[in-house]
Amino acid sequence: MWAAPPAAVARVAERLGVTPAALRLYGKRDQTRSDHLGQIAKYLEWQTAPGGSQAMKDLEQFLLDRAMEHDSPTLLFNLAREYLMAAKVIRPGAL
């Protein structure tokens, strides 16, 4: 399990009107983080990109075009990240 910096936890707790200790239990229910991610994405007007979706096909074409110009995996990863951010698409997890 990852831990957030104490200053960040304190700031979030303050904004939520709870104690920092109350946030320790966040995410104990498996579905909580997924539910909240969906709510946040909807609020911010971002979309998910399941395999085979149009968003993923667009990303694949974008990367194919860039791969013809560059052969650095790190550069291609960063270009993909920037592309997805600009398109408001949540980056899929690594397989």
Image (tube, rainbow, N blue to C red):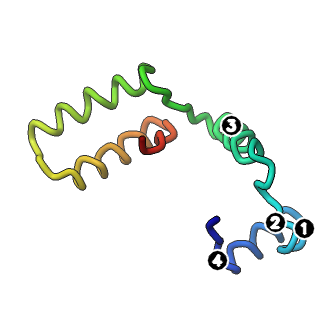
Residue 79, x across and y down, in percent: 29, 47
Quadrant for the C terminus in the image: top left
Cβ–Cβ below 8 Å for labels 1 and 2?
Answer: yes
On the rendered structure, is 28 left or right of 52?
right
Distance from Cα at disc 3 to Cα at disc 1 = 22 Å
Give the amino acid at mark 4.
Answer: Pro
Lower sequence index among marks 1 and 4:
4
Residue displayed at 63% across by 40% down:
44
Lower sequence index among marks 1 and 2:
1
Lower sequence index among marks 3 and 2:
2
* Figure check: 68 above or below 3: above
Instruction: Describe the element under mark 2 as helix, strand or loop.
Output: helix
Distance from Cα at disc 3 to Cα at disc 4 = 24 Å
9 and 26: which one is in front?
26
Label 1 crowd (10 A; few <14 / some 14-19 / many >=20): few
Where is mark 1, residue-wise? 18
Residue 92, x across and y down, in percent: 47, 39
Lower sequence index among marks 3 and 1:
1
Label 3 crowd (10 A; few <14 / some 14-19 / many >=20): some
Distance from Cα at disc 2 to Cα at disc 4 = 12 Å
Residue displayed at 86% across by 74% down:
21
Give the amino acid at mark 2.
Answer: Leu
- As drawn, the label of residue 38 is 3
Where is mark 2, residue-wise? 23
Instruction: Describe the element under mark 3 as helix, strand or loop.
Output: helix
Distance from Cα at disc 1 to Cα at disc 4 = 17 Å
Where is mark 4, residue-wise? 5
Residue displayed at 37% across by 47% down:
81
* Figure check: 71 above or below 48: below
Q: Quadrant of residue 55?
A: top left
Distance from Cα at disc 1 to Cα at disc 2 = 8 Å
Cβ–Cβ below 8 Å for labels 3 and 4?
Answer: no
